[in-house]
Each structure stands twice: as structure tokens, then as C-alpha cells.
Image (spheres, rainbow, N blue to C red):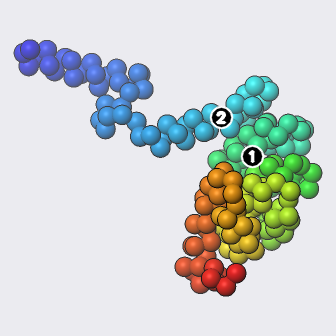
Amino acid sequence: MNSRSLCLMLFAVFVCADSLSVPVCGGVPRAEDSQKSAMRARKIAPLLAAGVDVESDDAVIAVLSTVQDTGIVCGAIFLIKERQLRQAAPQLHDVLNSRSPLVVLEACDALLKGLGDKEDTIGRCAELLDDRDVIVRLRAAGLLAASGSFSGWRVVKDGMNDRNPAIVLEASMVVGSFIRLEEQGKSDLGND
């Protein structure tokens, strides 16, 4: 192959690569990026199936007041968190009082990450520590720990000692938040 052919081939690769969505430098897309993309697609799929205009912030926020389906509402909350839509705070606070525990967890997560009043949200999230579903209790404990509250440690400790491997796995995913609290001097894991 002569140098002119090589130059033309490289030119074609660089010009066409953008339209093919193929990374020219760096090789294969990172697994983390494709996992995030797949997770995002799963989260918003119910919104798309319901015909919600996911590009419209107003339409996404309106879902919180008009739709009862857990998957659709969780998808809307995902987009609200992703876009940091502070104007959705009143609707998110309304969701705290009227939805399934999974939706309440998602709303708590959004509000605790800066979209709303932390104190009211921490109180509602703490109520979920008594939910009948152990996964809900563990996730609530994790949200509280990430917000600086040690109140869910007993739930996580019990989860780590559970016979069900799925519960142990879920609890182990939350332990890191409590370790960070310990490192910050906000709690004492050894005394409970």
C-alpha cells in the first residue's frame, strides 16, 4: 500500500467515524459508559412506552402529579435527578406522601441530592426503616447514611447477617456509606 492510499484510508476513517459513532482513538467504548447508557435506557423506557415527551422538562415533571404507575414515575424522577430540575421540588415533596415505598425512595434520593428540603425528606426516609420490605429498609438506610445520618445502621447490620444472599448483597452495597460516616467521625460502628 502506498502512502497516498494510506492517507486516503485514514482520512475516510476520521471523516466517517463520527457518523458511525465509532471511537477512532481509544478503541472500544468503556464498559462503564455502556452500562450507564443501558441503565438510562431501562429507566426511561416506561416513559417512552407511555408516550411521555422525555425531552420536555414540563412533561417529565407533570408525570409526578398525573401518573400512578411506579415504573413511569420512577423514570420521571430519574430524569429529574439527571437534569437537576429544582423546579420539581414541590411535586417531589408531594410524592413523599402518596406513593409506593420504591417511589418514595426515589423521591427521597432526588430531594436529598439537593433538589429539595433535606430535613423533611430525612424524616420521611427514616420512616421507611420500618417498612415491611427489607430491601426498602436497606435502601432507605443507605440514603440516610449518604446524607449524614447513622439511623439505619441496625437495618444494615441485620442485613449483613441475613441468611438470604440477596439481602446480604444489598446490605453490603450500603455499608460503604456508613464507613464514610465513621471516617468523618460522625458515628461509631463498633458501638451498635
Residue topped by disc 2? 42
Q: Nearer the viewer, mark 2 or mark 1?
A: 2
Most distant residue in the right direction: 98
Q: Check disc 1 and report its element: helix, strand or loop.
A: helix
Quadrant in the rendering for residue 56: top right
Q: What residue is rendered at 69% in x and 35% in y?
A: 44
Q: Is residue 30 left or right of residue 160?
A: left
Instruction: Name which of mark 2 and mark 1 comes first in the sequence.
Output: 2
Residue topped by disc 1? 77
2 and 1 marks in contact (CB < 8 Å): no
Q: Position of residue 79 (x, y in %)?
A: 69, 43
Most distant residue in the front direction: 163
The amino acid type, in three-letter code, at marker 2 is Arg
Q: Is residue 178 left or right of residue 94?
A: left
Q: What residue is rendered at 62% in x and 38% in y?
A: 40
Q: Check disc 2 and report its element: helix, strand or loop.
A: helix
Quadrant in the rendering for residue 62: top right
Q: Is residue 123 left or right of residue 160?
A: right
The amino acid type, in three-letter code, at marker 1 is Ile
Q: Position of residue 177 (x, y in %)?
A: 61, 67
